[in-house]
Amino acid sequence: MATRSTIGMVQEGGTIRSIYCHFDGYPKGVGVTLKNCYNDTITIENLLDLGDLSVLDVEIGEKQDFDQRTEGHCLFYGRDRGEDGIDALVHANVEEWLGFRKGNCCEYGYLWNGTSWSTFEI
């Protein structure tokens, strides 16, 4: 069973740009990986640019076969499985972001504010 989460970043003006992540969304999974491996704005922007994730891992990696994931690399629905409609979304504020993602059955939210991560239980 998946523990779904959302990964967001505060944009200029306070909007939130976010993606969905299907697996290991609990704080000891996605939360630890974000804190340890995704701790600068450029890397996080690169992650969000690839859209919704099946699996977050320690490296963004390159395009791969969705059914034969390269260990240590993220698995994206768009890049690796060719799906459409998986781009990052922009929300007006934190409340709208969390409310929308709750409707996607996300259990946790992770928000980068430019210097650090915050964790939300949805």
Image: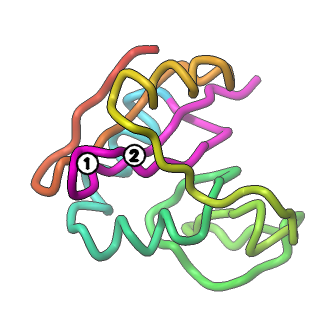
Q: Which residue is mark 2?
A: 8
Which quadrant of the figure contains the N terminus?
top right
Q: Which mark is residue 79?
A: none
Q: CA distance from mark 2 to mark 1?
A: 6 Å
User: Type of residue at label 1?
Assistant: Trp
Q: Amino acid at mark 2?
A: Gly
Looking at the picture, how far across and down is residue 8, in whole percent? 40, 46
Which residue is painted at 35% across and 65% down in the image?
44
**Residue at x 33%, y 33% (from the top left corner):** 93
In the rendered image, residue 6, in percent from the top left (x then y), is placed at 51, 37
Q: Quadrant of residue 85?
A: bottom right
Q: Say which label, 2 or 1, has the lower sequence index.
A: 2
- Residue furthest top in the image: 122
Residue at the left extreme of this rendering: 115
Instruction: Give the labeled residue for mark 1.
Output: 112
Number of numbered tags placed on the structure image: 2
Where does residue 26 sit, x and y in percent of width and height?
A: 47, 27
- In the rendered image, residue 9 lying in the magenta stretch gets the answer yes
Residue depicted at x 21% and y 51%:
13
Question: What colour scheme governs how the chains and residues are painted in the rendered image of this protein?
Answer: rainbow
Residue 83, percent from left and from top: 86, 63
Return the residue nearer the eye: 89 or 111.
Answer: 89
| Boundaries of the magenta span | 1-25
Apparent side of residue 77 relative to residue 33 in the rendered image (left or right): right
